[in-house]
């Protein structure tokens, strides 16, 4: 018998989701720091998008993560 839990995820999932959102926002912030015209520098084309993609990977993992105590 499963416990009646109204939330679809556990607390660890929600913490990972918040970390992922923070990483995504950090990536967008880094892209905005680019001093080249139209963001065509290293920060706007390489570093920022890589960090943003890492944030989306963390979000995907947070959704699929199932703690061992559940």
Image (cartoon, grey):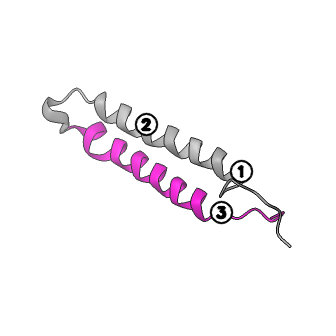
Q: Position of residue 9 (x, y in %)?
A: 67, 56
**Which of disc 2 and disc 1 is earlier in sequence?**
1
Question: Left of 4 or right of it: where is 47?
Answer: left
**Dot 1: what SS?**
helix
Q: Which residue is mark 1?
A: 12
Q: Which residue is mark 3?
A: 65
**Is disc 1 surrounded by few (<14), some (14 to 19) or many (20+) residues within 10 Å?**
few
Quarter of the picture containing the N terminus is bottom right
**Dot 2: what SS?**
helix
Q: Position of residue 14 (x, y in %)?
A: 64, 47
What span is in magenta? 41-70
Tag nearer the camera, 1 or 2: 1
Q: Which residue is mark 2?
A: 25
Q: Position of residue 11 (x, y in %)?
A: 72, 48
- Dot 3 and dot 1 residues touching (CB under 8 Å): yes
**Dot 3: what SS?**
loop
- Give the Cα separation between the discs numbered 3 and 1: 9 Å
**Which of disc 3 and disc 2 is earlier in sequence?**
2
């Amino acid at each position: 018998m499963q416990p009646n839990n109204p939330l679809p995820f556990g607390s660890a999932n929600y913490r990972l989701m918040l970390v992922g959102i923070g990483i995504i926002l950090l990536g967008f912030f880094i892209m905005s720091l680019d001093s080249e015209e139209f963001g065509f520098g290293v920060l706007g084309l390489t570093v920022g998008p890589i960090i943003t993609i890492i944030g989306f990977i963390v979000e995907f993992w947070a959704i699929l993560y199932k703690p061992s105590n559940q």
